[in-house]
Image: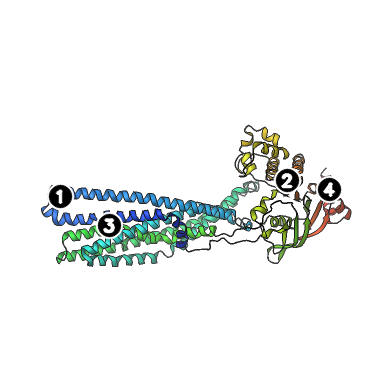
Amino acid sequence: MNTHHNINEKLSPVRFLWGHARHYRSFIIQAVISILMMALVNLPMPLLNKVFIDYLIPGGTVRQLLFIGVLAFLARSMAAAFQAFQNYVVRRVTTGIGHQLRSEMMGAMLGAPYSKFVPGEIAGYVGRLSSDVSRVEMLIYETIAFVVRPLGMLLVMLVAMCLLYWPMAILLMLMVPVSVFATRKMSHRLRDLEREVLQQLQAMNHEMTEILDNIRVIRCFTKEGFFQNRVEDRIERIAEASVQLATRQRLVQLAIDVINMAPWLAVVLAGGWMVHENRISLGDFMAFMTFEQLLRSPLSQLVYYLLRIRGEMVGTDRVQEVTSLDTDRTEGRTLEEPKGEIAFQNLSFSYLEGKPVLQQLNERVAPGERIGIVGPSGGGKSTLINLLLGFYSPDSGTILIDGIPIQEMDTESLRRNIGVVFQDNPMFDASIRSNLLLGQKGFGDEQLWEALKKANVDDFVRSLPDELETLIGVKGLKLSGGQRQRLAIARVILKDPAIVIMDEATSSLDSVTELQIEEALEQLLENRTSLTIAHRLSTVVRADRILYLEDGKIIESGSHGELIQRKGRYYALYEAQTEGLLADR
């Protein structure tokens, strides 16, 4: 199956975020309007100070004082109302984008090439659904709260100050870019440290998940202490990186606090001199002091944002790494009335260059034919199945189903017509009904019970108190291996595929359970093309043909009887397994 790149190429954080935020333009416009309104209703405060000092203290009345007090109260109340509305709108935007990103990430992970799952790479991405998307949500919130809002307030306030006394306004405007530039220079290294901490956390989460998944092996070998020490080493590295990050952040913040004193100091010195020279009144001076105080908050927010922006953008980069994953889903021809014919033509494949797993393999499987595939481990049996399912693309050659190359086939159509019963069939932490259906629609209880009966597991399910609604636990651990296997067979029976693949479906079962499974498999394989991978030859002795695969090549092909008569590789394997059974007895 050819791997197609995701249509979303790697974008800059700004373009990536705007690509999602533009769907919420109306909300963003409302937020900007509320920000400007909040800045406008804050304007009376400095001017009220001027009026109070220059006019009311020298000769104002009580009524005028009360009027000024009411105006100040109304201005503060309206500013608070606009801020509350702005916070609501911004949260609607951030949660909406967060939901969109999580949905895209989940779709990208579900559609990622199978090769991404084998080394556990995808498992490392799972934590990003929560942590990194939350960082992106915070980045969006802070962009509006600590950039758009401060800039809006700075603009309105500076215009008002220019109207009041423009030389002082110009002085403040000169101080703002100096403060911003200095902060940006100091925060440059923070993004790299932030990324390092996140990568270490992701690696630790993956390692701890792997350890807990293999707890039985660890306890059997009494290696709890070894793995504890291994995790603690990683925790120490994370702690060290976190201390470096926190220390640098705090030093930068302290420097910013000092820098932020520059505008205040400029107003005090310049304003005091101007009052002394009678260029402005004391009321004008107090108005400018109030403007400076009002400006200090948006300036601090803007600087805070510039301090954090590099670190927060790491989350955007890491989200994009997931949403821009390749996909193995393709659109193409569909199987309308599948017959189940399979043809392997000059098929070659290798995981590593120069180390072929399959070499120029040619074979045809007729509709309804039962094929057994045997051979030593590493011979290419499971790889052949992975190629048939479109999990990997062949290096050369092709696989045809009913005459259609699978590279030209719609991925969903291909996999919809293939059913697989694995050696280990982990279930979901849900009911038996949910595990049988896996989201399929249009099946009634009667059809479910019929599938369970064919799978030789209906009596067991009926014996349960909740029958089909019985919860079977994480990975189906409340069931035995044989019960899970028969439920997996029932699930494939419901799917009704043209082709059935059985990958070591009975290798780990006892003799009684294996007999029950084989009876269920007879029901499943009736009138279907099947490929059965097996190490235990008892599983394939009734196959129409058996392929002996070794070193990526078909060494022998024929029925069980024919291969026994030839006394070749298959015969030697059969003899070894038969002698082993006799020796055990």
Mark 3 surroundings: few (<14), some (14-19) or many (≥20) residues within 10 A: some
Return the residue at label 4: 578
For mark 4, give the secondary structure: helix
Q: Report the Cα–Cα distance between label 4 and label 2.
A: 18 Å
Is the residue under label 1 in contact with that under label 4 (CB below 8 Å)?
A: no
Q: Comparing marks 4 and 1, which lies closer to the viewer? A: 1
Q: What is the number of the mark on residue 64?
A: 1
At which x and y percent is residue 380? 73, 58
**Residue, x 47% and y 52% (percent of image)?**
98
At which x and y percent is residue 47? 21, 57
Q: Comparing marks 2 and 1, which lies closer to the viewer? A: 1
Q: The residue under label 4 is which amino acid type?
A: Thr
Q: Is tag 4's residue or tag 1's residue first in the polypeptide sequence?
A: 1
Return the residue at label 2: 508
Q: Comparing marks 4 and 3, which lies closer to the viewer? A: 3
Q: Report the Cα–Cα distance between label 3 and label 2.
A: 74 Å
Q: Is tag 3's residue or tag 2's residue first in the polypeptide sequence?
A: 3
Image quarter where the N terminus lies is bottom right
Residue 424, can we see it? yes
Q: The residue under label 1 is which amino acid type?
A: Gln
